[in-house]
């Protein structure tokens, strides 16, 4: 429909895995390296596991891998793992070219046939690899059968390498106790995360160029909106971007705007939240007058926390009303700093309890107040719904939320209360108030208690949520060249201004260099962009309440 209009040779955002359009971000290159490691001699037999959300590009990576298999490698690719253990053996045998007509009804004969084939391949110097896509659909019985195949070996090496590709549910499946022997044989793991803001921009430009475009019709704001609505998932980027191009064509516009992206996303994401256009955090008229009036009595010396929209600390009064900063409902102490709230622990805080005792009634009750409990730590107990909405993707209600992956050390360095994402169905969260040695202070309000880290580790794979108050219109991404009051706040947080700035400073190359160094020092991707993760790390030095307690 729009190809001639935009000067394209072919559709740039088809959802089929066309090799001509392959874009390998750093994450995808790392994932591909793990797969190639798995099918090469480095795998040393056993299993290689690649997981990722739906639409992140696992199948595309699988095709890239198949085009780069080392010489002398035989691949058995299974695309439909919804089979019985015996059917799985038969499918592997058929993929390797074995005749199973006489052994199809006997598991023993199928295994014997595979063993003979593998020994012959080993004598020829060939390597045999089984690749199972959508492996999260394998039954535990089928997985156990696959594990038994890795017992086929010579005195020096394994005869078969297994590569499992699947959605995050595969990780949950392999956490089962009855599959622990298989989990121990996984020699390489990689979780493919979605694209970041910068890579999303590069991805769109790449596909437009491959399709023959002489210019990229997506404006910067449209690219930011595309990342926001797709969350960096390539398949969603393709679907939304395609509909956005249709919208521009229908409206006879040569540029795609953020409004078009949001309209397109609302059309294709049926049954999901409908998001209106996200505006940058400047406003005028009555809203600005109200904001100025609300903070008129606050002085520069009161400004102890410089994050956007932070609740519980004063705002910068002399700065223009460009940042939609919610006014704190609770006043800070006269020192201008909020004091950390040390909660009272129900029962004996020194007595450790196992997670098994929390799994049923306690943990279920905890889910009913976990969001309100987190809001209470920010002294806004009525904002539990807004925090939950932010963690579900709606950051227009005064809070931002980041889902991250890490360990105890990373959470301790962050220094803020977090919600651990436990491996249970439905989604289950555990509010962490404090961390001390090998113990955790968990729960909300009167249900606070102390448990051991070890009790949590059996149900936690490193995912956690951290939320903070933030103006609804705060930019999704701030980059070099941007000039706004948001940039002024970022520079102020970073300590890059000697005195309050009254104009609109520019995000220049000098600050970009400083920012990349800051990101490297904090274990972030050094892309020179202020996204949500970088913003959080810039803020933490100024957040004095709430904090992750080190003693209670």
Image: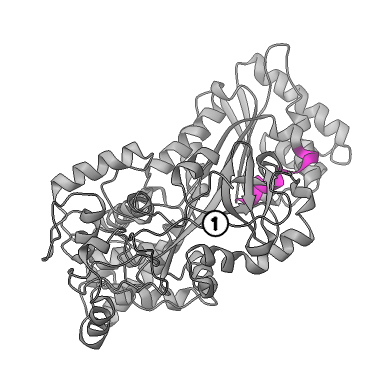
Name the residue carrying label 1. 54
The spot of residue 100 in percent (x, y) is 79, 37
Q: Find the residue positioned furthest to the top.
A: 155
* Region rendered in magenta: 168-179
In the displayed structure, does residue 498 sit left or right of residue 272? left
Binning the other alpha carbons within 10 Å of mark 1 as few (below 14), some (14 to 19) or many (20 upward) gives some
Q: Nearer the viewer, residue 50 or 462?
A: 462
Residue 229's image quarter? bottom left
The spot of residue 53 in percent (x, y) is 54, 54
Residue 220's image quarter? bottom left
Q: Find the residue positioned furthest to the front.
A: 334
The spot of residue 45 in percent (x, y) is 64, 24
Q: Is residue 304 visible?
A: yes
Residue 178 falls inside the magenta stretch: yes
Tell me what residue is drawn at x 25 percent, y 47 percent: 528
The spot of residue 405 in percent (x, y) is 51, 46
Q: Quadrant of the N terminus?
A: bottom left
In the displayed structure, does residue 90 sit left or right of residue 477? right
Looking at the image, is 435 positioned above or below residue 278?
A: above
Looking at the image, is 417 positioned above or below residue 279?
A: above
Residue 472 falls inside the magenta stretch: no
């Amino acid at each position: 429909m729009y190809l001639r209009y935009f000067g394209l040779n072919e559709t740039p955002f088809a959802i089929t895995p066309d090799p001509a359009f392959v874009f390998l971000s750093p994450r995808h290159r790392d994932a591909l390296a793990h797969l190639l490691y798995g099918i090469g001699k480095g795998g040393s037999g056993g299993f290689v596991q690649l997981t990722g959300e739906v639409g992140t590009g696992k199948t595309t990576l699988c095709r890239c891998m198949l085009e780069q298999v080392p010489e002398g490698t035989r691949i058995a690719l299974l695309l439909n793992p919804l089979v019985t253990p015996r059917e799985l053996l038969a499918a592997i045998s058929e993929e390797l070219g074995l005749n199973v007509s006489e052994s199809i009804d006997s598991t023993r004969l199928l295994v014997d046939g595979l063993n003979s084939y593998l020994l012959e391949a080993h004598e020829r110097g060939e390597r045999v690899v089984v690749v199972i896509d959508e492996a999260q659909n394998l039954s535990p019985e089928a997985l156990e059968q696959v594990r038994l195949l890795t017992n086929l070996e010579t005195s020096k090496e394994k005869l078969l390498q297994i590569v499992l590709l699947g959605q995050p549910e595969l990780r949950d499946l392999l956490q089962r106790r009855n599959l622990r022997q298989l989990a121990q044989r996984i020699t390489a793991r990689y979780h493919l995360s979605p694209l970041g803001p910068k890579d999303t921009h590069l991805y769109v430009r790449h596909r437009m160029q491959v399709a023959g475009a002489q210019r990229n019709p997506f404006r910067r704001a449209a690219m930011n909106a595309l990342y926001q609505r797709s969350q960096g998932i390539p398949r969603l980027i393709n679907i939304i971007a395609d509909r956005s191009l249709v919208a521009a064509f229908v409206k006879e516009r040569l540029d795609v705007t953020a409004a078009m992206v949001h309209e397109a996303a609302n059309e294709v994401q049926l049954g999901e939240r409908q998001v209106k256009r996200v505006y940058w955090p400047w406003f005028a008229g009555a809203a600005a007058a109200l904001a100025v009036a609300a903070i008129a009595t606050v002085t520069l010396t009161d400004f102890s926390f410089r994050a956007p929209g932070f609740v519980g600390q004063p705002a910068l009064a002399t700065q223009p009303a460009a940042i939609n900063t919610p006014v704190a409902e609770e006043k800070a102490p006269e020192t201008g700093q909020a004091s950390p709230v040390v909660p009272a622990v129900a029962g004996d805080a020194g007595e450790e309890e196992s997670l098994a005792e929390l799994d049923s009634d306690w943990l279920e009750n905890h889910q009913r107040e976990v969001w309100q409990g987190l809001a209470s730590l920010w002294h806004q107990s009525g904002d539990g719904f807004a925090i939950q909405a932010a963690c579900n993707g709606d950051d227009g209600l005064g809070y931002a939320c980041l889902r991250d992956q890490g360990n105890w050390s990373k959470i301790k360095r962050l220094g803020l209360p977090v919600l651990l994402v436990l491996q249970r169905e439905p989604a289950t969260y555990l509010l962490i108030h404090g961390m001390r040695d090998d113990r955790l202070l968990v729960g909300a309000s009167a249900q606070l208690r102390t448990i051991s880290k070890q009790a949590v580790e059996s149900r936690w794979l490193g995912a956690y949520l951290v939320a903070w108050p933030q103006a609804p219109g705060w930019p999704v991404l701030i980059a070099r060249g941007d000039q706004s009051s948001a940039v002024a706040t970022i520079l102020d947080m970073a300590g890059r201004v000697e005195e309050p700035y009254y104009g609109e400073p520019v995000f220049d190359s000098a600050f970009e260099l400083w920012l990349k160094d800051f990101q490297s020092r904090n274990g972030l991707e050094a892309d020179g962009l202020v996204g949500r993760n970088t913003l959080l790390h810039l803020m933490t030095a100024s957040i004095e309440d709430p904090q992750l307690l080190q003693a209670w």
